[in-house]
Amino acid sequence: MEFSQQFSFDAIMTFIERYKTVLLIAGVVVGVAIGGGVYWHLSRTKHQELAQATLSEVLNETIRAQQNAELWPEIEVAARTGYQQYSSTSLAPYFLAVQADALIQQNKHADALSLMREALNSLSERSPLYFLYATKQARIMLDSEDENTQTQGLEKLISISKNNNNLQKDETLYYLGSYYMNRADNEKALKAFNEIVEMTKNQTDYPSPWTRLAQEAVRELA
């Protein structure tokens, strides 16, 4: 399996939950006070709500695709159509990212990398999902047949793993550790996995699935 295709069901659910967090934030209606009254931007809000509903449906289909790989082409089309329909909304980059995921599952890495770059260019680092996408981009680059692209992908993954603004640092470290583990660089792999365990040991509200995976990797390497 390609490095960028590595999933676990827990990881997918984390991905979905993080998306839905953003959807809730993005779906808030913005009011503007004028002359003492409040006027809602109804048409814009309706368009955003439709985008939110469409993206949620596409994301739900990605869960089904874990059991039925034949669905990935349909998800690719649905995400592309969603982007075309809602490119003016704040959710547009997320359609691109889902389309990129569908392309990865079909081994269309060059197209996926292009879309992921486009999605990242549309987001600021303040977006809750910016670093999740950046991690995905690095993983796609590591699967490239071009050695320079692979090197850049590793450098990007290392850089992201050290960025304290990365809300998905546990995930980034897991894939960095997996990269080293696949290349029998056990010392660097253990360092990445142990950092996950240490940084997430006090999480109780929503335990990171990456902690369990990291713990399993540490036991395997012991």
Image: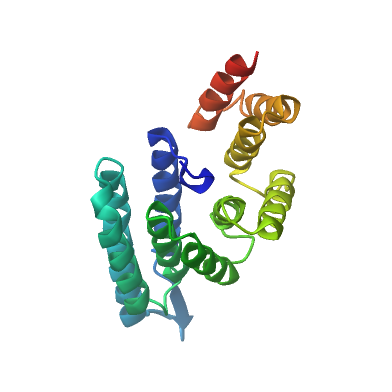
> Residue at the location (59% across, 39% down)?
175
Q: Quadrant of residue 96?
A: bottom left
Which residue is at the front of the view, 188 or 10? 188
Question: Where residue 62 sits in the image (x, y, percent)?
Answer: 31, 50
Which residue is at the front of the view, 216 or 179? 179
> Residue at the location (55% across, 54% down)?
140
User: Could one spot residue 128 in this view of the protein?
Assistant: no
The furthest residue to the bottom: 35
Q: What scheme was used to colour the molecule?
A: rainbow
Question: Where residue 194 sits in the image (x, y, percent)?
Answer: 68, 24
Q: Is residue 38 above or below residue 127?
A: below
Question: Where residue 151 sits in the image (x, y, percent)?
Answer: 72, 53
Which residue is at the front of the view, 14 or 96? 96
Which residue is at the front of the view, 113 or 25? 113
Q: Is residue 214 above or below residue 165?
A: above
Q: Is residue 76 above or below residue 143?
A: below
Q: Determine whether, in the image, residue 167 is placed left or right of residue 192.
A: left
Q: Quadrant of residue 24?
A: bottom left
> Residue at the location (45% across, 58% down)?
25
Q: Is residue 207 above or below residue 49?
A: above
Question: Where residue 83 sits in the image (x, y, percent)?
Answer: 37, 73
Quadrant housing the N terminus: top left
How many numbered discs? 0
Quadrant housing the C terminus: top right
User: Could one spot residue 127 in this view of the protein?
Assistant: yes
